[in-house]
Structure formats: structure tokens, C-alpha cells
Image (spheres, grey):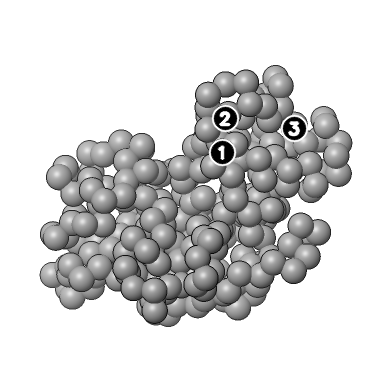
Amino acid sequence: AMNNGDNIWVIGDVHGYFNTFQVLVEKLQLKENDIVVMIGDLIDRGPTSAHVVNYVKTTENFYCIRGNHEQMMINGFDKNNFFNERTSDSQFWFRNGGKTTEESYITLYKNNPKMVLSKASNDVDWMENLPTEIVLDDWRFVHAGYDQNHDVEEQDEDMHMYARKQFYTSKHAIDPKRTILFGHTPTLKHLHKDDSKAGLVWFSDVKLDDGRSMAIGLDTCLYHDFNLPKVLAAYNIQTNEIIYQNLIIINQSKV
């Protein structure tokens, strides 16, 4: 796709807001061979996580990285007892948005317990097989980031899914050849530290030898409680174009 000049869009953390995600995808005006890469955290917090997962799984040329919320569902989902809070892992997941994910499966699959369990179980299997990074010649896609104090090629999946300050505070290029596109850390408070930039993609001030930013943060955040824009972003690595979509909540639960 890179060599053919097809568009390659990378979309930030959706967190279960299917309406917003769907409208953003429509704005991309995808052509037959264009590609979309989801940066992880399709689920939790918003009301329609099951819908987002189903769309990404079944739509051609959509790919996904495993985020920490997918990992929480993997750890917290109990195939024998359905979504329950009997273990510490399931309780942790529920407290971090898993309860709304459970409700979205029940809604999408019409309260049919066997269907709900089967679909959720299949989705967990799918999530377990998602990569935690994608590496191209000039780009890295990862949910959270890397530890600036270690070789970028020798880091485990937990770091890929959970890194924060040890990544974005780096004063040197963690991968000198590649710009790192990531989500996980909301740009509005942790990266920009400027409310006037809420809802905007973040570009690291650290530069590669070719002048590009060391890292680009895409989690413009749909779920925060501040009186600031709630936004989903898509970044085109071929053209550097950014397309934004503000949160849509009307009839979200009925999608």
C-alpha cells in the first residue's frame, strides 16, 4: 500500500463510541485499496464497544493493534461464567469500562445468552492474536509506546500496551529511523498541557534526522470529564493529513 500510494489511515482510541467512529470513517472517503489501522482500545467506557469490534473484525483492509483495554478484556473475561466480577482481573476490567462493554454485547446480540457468550468469546480470541506493534520502513504503530532507556527492538508486549512517561518524555529519538504513532495517553492534559489544544493530535518536539517528529500522539480522547472538546482523530501517513470527528452521543446506545 505504501509503494502503491494508497492511503493508510491510523485512528486513535475509539473506546466504544461506534457512532463517532463510523462518521469519522465516512469522512475518510476510503477507496478500494486504502488501509485503516486502529491503534488499540476499541472497547470500554463508551456504550457500543461490541459494535466497534464487530466492524473492525469484519471490514476489509481494517487492521488493529492490541491495546491495554483489549488486554484487560482478555484477562477479565470468563468463558464459563460470562462477564462476572469473581476474580481480581474481571473486577479491574469492570472498574475501567468493562461493564459498558458487557452491556454492549447484550444489546448487540439481543439478550441471547448463548449468542452473547459465543460472540464475546470469539472476540477475545481475536484480541489475543492482535499484534502489539506494527513496524514499517519509516513508521512504528503501537498502542502506548516504548521505554526510552532500552533498545526499541527488545521490549515486551506490556510496555507496548502500557508505557506512558518513560516513553513520551524522551528527549531523544527512541527509533532514529521511524516516527512512532501511538494512542493510550490522552493528548489534552498529559502531552499538550494546554487546554487550548484539547482535541488535537500531539507532535513530539524531538526530531528524527529527516526532520519528522519522533512520535505522534493520536488519543485525542472521547471520554474525559473536562469541559473541553471530545474528539476522535485519524492520521494519514502518506499525506500527513489529519481528520477529526467530535463525539456523537445522540442515540449512541441504539446503534
Separation (CA) of disc 1 from disc 3: 23 Å
For mark 2, what is the residue? 91
x and y percent of residue 122 in the render? 67, 35
Disc nearest the viewer among 1 and 3: 1
Q: Quadrant of residue 171?
A: bottom left
Q: Quadrant of residue 169?
A: bottom left
Camera-side residue: 99 or 244? Answer: 99
Res 95 label: 1
Secondary structure of residue under mark 1: helix
Camera-side residue: 243 or 5? Answer: 243
In the image: residue 103, left or right of residue 156: right
Q: Three-letter amino acid code at disc 2?
A: Gln
Q: Three-letter amino acid code at disc 1?
A: Arg
Q: Residues within 10 Å of mark 3 (few under 14, many from 20)?
A: some
Camera-side residue: 139 or 100? Answer: 100
| The C terminus sits in image quarter | bottom right
Secondary structure of residue under mark 2: helix
Query: Is the Cβ of the residue at disc 3 closer than 8 Å to that at disc 2?
Result: no
For mark 3, what is the residue? 118
Separation (CA) of disc 2 from disc 1: 6 Å
Secondary structure of residue under mark 3: helix
Q: Quadrant of residue 96?
A: top right
Residue at left offset 36%, top offset 37%? 158
Disc nearest the viewer among 3 and 2: 2
Residue at left offset 28%, top offset 63%? 215
| The N terminus sits in image quarter | bottom left
Q: Is residue 114 above or below residue 35?
A: above
Camera-side residue: 55 or 7? Answer: 55
Residue at left offset 60%, top offset 78%? 27
Q: Three-letter amino acid code at disc 3?
A: Ser
Can I make out residue 218 in this image? no
